[in-house]
Amino acid sequence: MRLIADLHLHSRYSRATSRDMDVENMSRWAKLKGITVLGTGDFTHPVWLRELRDKLEPNDRGLYVHDGVHFMLTAEVSSIYSAGGRLRKIHNILFAPSFEVVERINAVLGRFGNLMADGRPTLTLPSDRLVEYLMEISPDCMVVPAHAWTPWFSLYGSMSGFDSMAECFGDQIKHVVAVETGLSSDPPMNWRLSELDRVVLLSNSDAHSPAKLGREANVFACDPDYLEIMRALREKDLSRLLYTIEFFPEEGKYHYDGHRLCNHRMAPKETVAAGGKCPVCGKPPTVGVLHRVERLADREEGFVPEGAVPYRNLVPLEEIIAEALGAKPGTVGVREEYYKLCGAFGSEFNVLLDAPVEEVRRHTTVRVAEGLRRVREGRVRIAPGYDGVFGEIGIFEDGEEVREVIEPPSQTTLF
């Protein structure tokens, strides 16, 4: 069976998160998207944990169910601490196999920060000790560096991260078997670091609202079983972890260097040519993911390591519809068209991944169908994101008229 999993997201108890991020809305949107397993997010927050206990039923395989959607117990924590003479700010995702294990985790983490203050708590706990404590609580837990390249809060972040996994995790690195790439990087960018060959590259939405669920995800061939999913990751089993679903990384909000307040984006070469200063204000720009990858890479662009997990770049269906209709995602007309297509084909992922373009055309406008075809072929234009500003994606030329869908080639293959 195909199992689509989005394992990093936040509940309404996290800052800057929609009030609609509750169990009921998350379940409804997961079904609409075609997501089989959804992370709960925020299991460290006492009130959210109580809601999860009240509303989820165990499936006897380490996952929990609400209205047909399986949930995995997950959380993200922010560790802020000094190491190597610098202040480090690292986000890590936690996976746990049961509520009983979660209670033990929270009892430990509560010694290092206020778990009630935010769904993503801030801890004074270094990343290596975080891994050590979770492995002592249960070897079935997993710690995954979150959005590993984000400038401000990540493993490799330009502002407060490390230059290697060993620097961050020390002798606990043996327990770190997966890394989340984040929206602003994709697998080919990460393949340029040889130290990442030993880990699985995961992709998740980090959603703060239900409509953003599944904008990145992981596709497995296995049952909804916690230990089976963990084994697929630990063993880097390509027969069970089939591929990841990715943003085009340019669309992520930290892909390029730049200054949001100056409304200025910079490619890494432009930053170097400008002496590391923003040409508008003269201050150092926020160094983005692409620049950081270039700085740490020990391989040339285009290298593909042996045993690499395949991937597919996609654009969320609402964005395709919005571009085709000349509207904004989430507006009434766009949302109505989105619901119609999801209803016709069963889910958003069925539309994006499986449905023949000519069949989609029978249920929508010619521009939407043509937009889907172009996205599958990778024919998009993107003004890269920078310093917290999402990239701007374009599928059609200004004023372009589309009278018919050009006969599609065979379905996009995995990279």
Image (cartoon, rainbow, N blue to C red):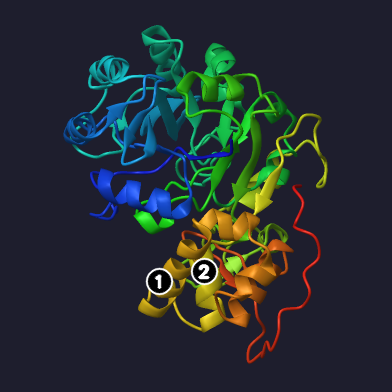
Direction from residue 242 to residue 184 in the image, left or right:
left
- The circle on residue 181 is none
**Residue 364 in view, yes or no:** yes
Residue 184 in percent (x, y) is at 58, 52
Q: CA distance from mark 2 to mark 1?
A: 10 Å
Which quarter of the image is occupied by the N terminus? top right
Residue 221 in percent (x, y) is at 61, 32
> In the rendered structure, which amino acid carries the disc numbered 1?
Arg
The residue tagged 2 is 319
**Residue 14 in view, yes or no:** no
> In the rendered structure, which amino acid carries the disc numbered 2?
Glu
SS assignment at label 1: helix
| Of residues 108 and 359, the one drawn nearer to the viewer in this rendering | 359
CB under 8 Å between callouts 2 and 1? no
Identify the residue shown where x is 21% and y is 28%. Answer: 53
- Which of label 2 and label 1 is nearer to you? 1
Q: Residues within 10 Å of mark 1 (few under 14, many from 20)?
A: some
Label tally: 2
Label 2 or label 1, whichever comes before in sequence order: 2
38 is higher (above) or lower (below) than 114: below
174 is higher (above) or lower (below) than 6: above
Residue 325 in percent (x, y) is at 52, 82
Q: Residues within 10 Å of mark 2 (few under 14, many from 20)?
A: many
Residue 21 in percent (x, y) is at 28, 50
Direction from residue 109 to residue 351 in the image, left or right:
right
- The circle on residue 335 is 1
SS assignment at label 2: helix
277 is higher (above) or lower (below) than 106: below
Identify the residue shown where x is 49% and y is 18%. Answer: 227
